[in-house]
Image (cartoon, grey):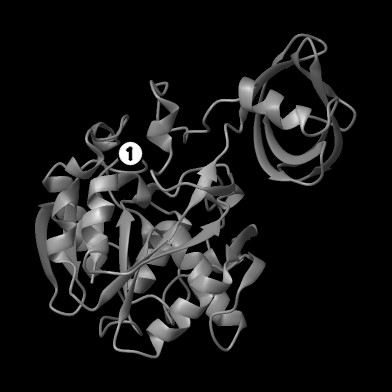
Amino acid sequence: MSLSLHDFQYYLPEKLIAQSPAHPRDSARLLLLNRQTHTISHHRISDLPNLLPPSYDLVVNNTKVFPARLLGHKATGGAVEILLLHKLSSARYHVITRPGLKVDQTIILSPTLSARVTHVAGRIRTLIFSQTDPTLTESLAQLGSMPTPPYIKRLLKDPADYQTVYAKYGFSAAAPTAGLHFTPHLIHTIKQAHAWHELTLNVGLGTFLPVKAEKITDHLMHAESYTLSPSTSLALTHLVHSSRRLLAVGTTTVRALESNLANHPSFTPGTFSTSIFMYPPYRFRATDALLTNFHLPGSTLLMLVSAFVSAPNTKDPFTTFAASLLGKAYAEAVQEGYRFFSFGDAMLIL
């Protein structure tokens, strides 16, 4: 089966693209999709403890979003926007710049901080800053802002809105948005009946790059790093050998879990790199259920969720998104006025 970008399109009115998060977070809407019975029902995130089957435990991505968007200007005066992607050393980063810059061009960020382009590879630039750590990290944190996606037109009133309440580690260029729906109270309630496990995947370039290749297998997925602790690895290994089942919160969590089992005989602790690309007919080995937001047409995230709701993970072969069970759920979400993308509503897939 050869799938094209056209196979993963759907109609979305612009008014349904959420520009701000729900307050409180767990008041967002939740569409429950049962892959086996083909049933759809409508709820709130706060209903999650009552919707989860008793045998399910949760795994979340506790990565922390760094204020990775910087505004500066070239020595000639033109404005430059920088998105920090990956830290290479105490003074060097992989970045995306807008506009694209050439080797040896300099960006002035403040009276005491500048950066010079040392290498160009496609859309990626390597910058060396005029400061080194720990001073550089402090300066970037002061100068930077949260790198919200381009479809969010409003400035964040509170940067904490783009951070999960359980964010702890890492360096992400975007939030693991399914996790934005959780509140401390909701987590406390869930933990009364379900185990809670955490891993760290640093969300990077793949989140921002659209699929441009018409044949999706020609799309190049960029790598992201993830860390699985010894305690989480051991707990997940015990889980898969028991009657318990695993609910992944967000596609970034799925990427880490599936990558780990794809490369090891069982869950293995450590820090690894993943460039896994999941699309139909990918067979999921680690993920039994998924809590996720609604994703952009033609995106790799939509392809991942399409695979999760189709064969060999269900009895339904995938032909096109529009004809799939997931496509029908999205169409109903549009009809019901759900809010889409990073600050939008969510879907629980069992």
**Circle 1 crowding by C-alpha within 10 Å: few under 14, some 14–19, many from 20:** many
Specify the quadrant of the image occupied by residue 137.
Answer: top right
Q: Residue at x 45, y 67 (%)?
A: 254
Residue at image position (56%, 49%) is: 169
Give coordinates of residue 346: x percent, y percent: 26, 51
Residue 300 at x, y percent in the picture: 47, 58
Q: Secondary structure at mark 1?
A: loop
Name the amino acid, label 1. Answer: Phe
* Residue that carries the numbered disc 1 in the rendered image: 343
Could you tell me residue 326's position as x and y percent?
25, 65
The answer to whether residue 99 of the structure is visible from this angle is: no
Is the N terminus in the top left, top right, bottom left or bottom right quadrant? bottom left
Q: Is residue 178 above or below residue 240?
A: above
Picture layout, residue 156 above or below residue 320: above
For the point 22% across and 64% down, which residue is it?
192
Relative to 76, 28 lies left or right: left
> 265 left or right of 125?
left
Query: Whole-percent x and y of residue 283?
Result: 43, 82
**Image quarter hosting the C terminus:** bottom left
Q: Quadrant of residue 198?
A: bottom left
- Give above or below for 66 relative to 275: above
The structure residue drawn at horizontal position 56% and vertical position 47%, both measured from the top left corner, is 209
Q: Is residue 127 left or right of residue 99?
A: right
